[in-house]
Image (tube, helix red, strand yellow):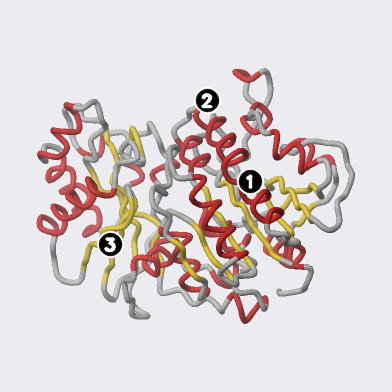
Amino acid sequence: MKYVVILSDGMAGRPLPELGGRTTLEAADTPVMDELSRVSELGTASMVPEGMAPGSDTANLAVMGYDPKIYYTGRSPLEALSIGVGMEDTDVSFRCNLVTLSEEEGPYEERTIIDHSSGEISTEDAAVLIKALKEGLGREGYDFYTGTSYRHLLIQKHGALSELTPPHDILTRRIGEFLPADPVLFEMMKKSYDILENHPLNVSRREKGLRPANSAWFWGAGRKPVLTSFEERTGKKGVMISAVDLLKGIAAGAGMKRVIVEGANGGLHTNYAGKAQAAVKALTRDGYDFAYIHIEAPDEMGHQGLIEDKISAIEHVDREVLKAVTDGLEGAGEDYRLLLLPDHPTPIELRTHTGDAVPYLLYDSTAKQENGTVYNEKTAAQTGKNWPDGYKLLGHLLQEDIC
């Protein structure tokens, strides 16, 4: 038996007047999901424990079968694992977003966040700006590291943990009340605007109609993580397929193989088919038992408030990932169990995450369950099946108690 998780990040949402009271998942044309749904188990699972922030960090740990209350030490340290940054026990890692702030006259504190991702800036452009920050903000005990797209790192030696606000939680809002209390972090962020605002690369981006990446934003602080081996816990040899450092970091900590897919960038125009092909190859030719395919695009479109693009992202998942995986495994004669779900909702109207339970679809090629319904938030909730401790759902997929 082979096992697959297709994690469509932020895919769930809430009914929208613009869609006649439907969610983007309901509005999307998803024939493969619909066909599988009619012979699958549907239900809901709470991936974010009560009292914890609804982030992709806590939620994906839970989907992977790790209780976030035990294993979570912060988002940025997981990304540090992916980038290969060594941390001491007393170090603190911060996510460093490259964001777009408003550029009207006035003090830094009066600006608003226009875009948490600087228009999904490319890694190549971002590397140039991170280099400028290293040179302009360099000081002993603080080191910048380039990650992927807008997602980067600041490591503080022998640092103190700080409560910091994710930029995607305060889009369009004045930043003053959300700036760090730590005076060093505050000054670094403020100075980052002075360094980046008229950087030649940002001048060029404006000329091309692109959003400038004109400020650093620190959040997601945490200390060195310690995850137990996925294979030791489950008996399954696993592979992670994702474009984002968070998921690759979780995989690194869990001792899973990380597959880099050319053209996978975490955006709407990622290489969906390449991810599916990599999973099928790992399961049918390379000796792996378990594949985790993470697709970031629905979440990014939710953060940007783009209804049609979020629908498009979901449709790409349906026809380019789900269909390719099921066709590939069936063509190879493999028995398999497949779990499709988001980690958390990212409702269009909120443009950020919520901790609501997410809908899941669990398909078993050897034991189909006739239910005659399609997959979405409403139908999953109507089944009455719910996993209040969402981290236990992986054991249900694997048909064993791993918690």
**Which residue corresponds to the image point at 16% horizontal and 55% vertical from the top-left?**
131
The residue at the point 48 percent across, 73 percent down is: 253
Name the mark nearer the viewer: 1 or 2: 1
Q: Examine the image and state in which quarter residue 222 appears.
A: bottom left
Q: Hey, what amino acid is under mark 3?
A: Leu
Q: Nearer the viewer, mark 3 or mark 1?
A: 1
**Are there few (<14), some (14-19), or many (20+) residues within 10 Å of tag 3?**
many
Question: On the rendered structure, is 81 left or right of 192?
Answer: right
Residue in front for this viewpoint, 70 or 144: 144
Would residue 171 be found to the left or right of residue 32 on screen? left
Q: Amino acid at mark 2?
A: Glu
Query: Residue 322 has which mark?
Result: 1
| Label 3: which secondary element | strand
Dot 3 corresponds to which residue? 154
Q: Which residue is mark 2?
A: 308
Q: Is residue 280 left or right of residue 269?
A: right
Q: Nearer the viewer, residue 218 or 231?
A: 231
Relative height, residue 36 to residue 286 (above, below): above
Residue 180 shows up from this direction? no
> Callout 2: few (<14), some (14-19), or many (20+) C-alpha neighbours within 10 Å?
some
- Image coordinates for residue 279, horizontal then vertical, percent: 56, 58
Image quadrant where residue 169 sits: top left
Q: Are marks 1 and 2 in contact (CB under 8 Å)?
A: no
Residues at badges 3 and 1 in contact (C-beta under 8 Å)?
Answer: no
Position of residue 384 measured from the top left corner of the image (x, y, whole percent): 85, 46
The amino acid sitting under disc 1 is Leu
Tell me what residue is drawn at x 41 percent, y 74 percent: 224
